[in-house]
Image (cartoon, rainbow, N blue to C red):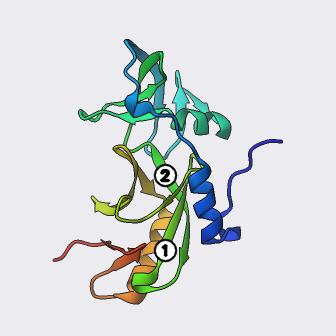
């Protein structure tokens, strides 16, 4: 049976929590292979993946490669296995948040995001939302971030403005995130 991407609109927060818990990522942070090289891959700022200039269009390939991503303290991104560590060019950030599910209001709100890799991430104290150069980003894991796609950005901004039009901020799982910088 082929893999099917989760549709957040059809999932409850309990369903999303179960899917997040079920996704077991490889321990790439603990792997230190001696064999290094160049993957000849690039992730464009719009989230598209390329190998030797050709776009990778199979979602299953992107999902598999994204589970092997790591970012070092110098900002270099790598695809890591126990045997090999291959550099990968990332134009901005490796992920795009393409879908948002919001439940609750104010301090009782919970926000869940689906990434272009089909990973699911809750915004919380460990997965911050931050503004950079007029764009919103979501912390995913181990130095890896997702940029919010324009429709997701607008949806989130509308929620924040509805609750606090003077200084837009939003809560998720007990953490508060400011969507603008004070003037």
Q: Residue at 39%, 29% (x, y): give it.
A: 30
Q: Residues within 10 Å of mark 2 (few under 14, many from 20)?
A: many
Q: Residue furthest right?
A: 1
Q: Position of residue 85 (x, y in %)?
A: 42, 20
User: Along the line of sight, which residue is nearer the eye, 91 or 59?
Assistant: 59
Left or right: where 135 falls relative to 64: left
Place residue 90 in its image quadrant.
Answer: top left
User: Would you place residue 66 above or below residue 80 in this image?
Assistant: below
Q: Secondary structure at mark 2?
A: strand
Relative to 68, 56 lies left or right: right
Q: Residue furthest top?
A: 35
C-beta proximity under 8 Å, tags 2 and 1: no
Residue 163 drawn at (x, y percent)? 39, 88
Marks 2 and 1, how far apart in space? 19 Å
Point out which mark residue 149 bears: none
Q: How many residues crowd mark 1 within 10 Å: few (<14), some (14–19), many (20+)?
A: many
Q: Classify 38 as above or below 132.
A: above
Q: Quadrant of the C terminus?
A: bottom left
For the residues carrying marks 2 and 1, which lies nearer the camera in this image?
Answer: 1
For the N terminus, the image quarter is top right
Drawn side of residue 63 relative to residue 43, left or right: right
Residue 110 lies, with reference to residue 134, above or below; the image says: below
Q: Secondary structure at mark 1?
A: strand
Residue 110's disc is 1
Going from N to C along the chain, the mark reached first, 2 or 1, is: 2
Q: Residue at x 53, y 30 (%)?
A: 50
Residue at x 42%, y 17% (from the top left corner): 38
Report x, y in % for residue 131. 30, 63
Question: What residue is shown with label 2?
Answer: 96
């Amino acid at each position: 049976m082929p893999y099917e991407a989760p549709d957040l609109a059809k999932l409850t927060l309990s369903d999303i929590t179960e899917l997040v818990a079920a996704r077991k990522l490889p321990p790439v942070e603990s792997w230190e292979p001696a064999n290094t090289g160049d993957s000849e891959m690039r992730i464009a700022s719009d989230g598209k993946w390329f190998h030797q200039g050709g776009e990778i269009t199979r979602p299953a390939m992107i999902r598999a490669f994204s589970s092997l991503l790591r970012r070092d303290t110098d900002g270099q991104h790598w695809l890591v296995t126990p045997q090999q560590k291959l550099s990968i060019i990332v134009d901005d950030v490796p992920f795009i948040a393409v879908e948002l599910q919001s439940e609750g209001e104010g301090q009782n709100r919970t926000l869940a995001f689906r990434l272009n890799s089909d990973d699911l991430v809750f915004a919380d104290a460990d997965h911050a939302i931050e503004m950079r150069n007029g764009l919103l980003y979501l912390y995913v894991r181990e130095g890896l971030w997702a940029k919010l796609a324009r429709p997701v950005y607008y949806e989130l901004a509308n929620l924040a403005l509805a609750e606090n039009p003077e200084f837009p901020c939003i809560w998720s799982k007990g953490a508060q995130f400011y969507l603008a910088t004070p003037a």
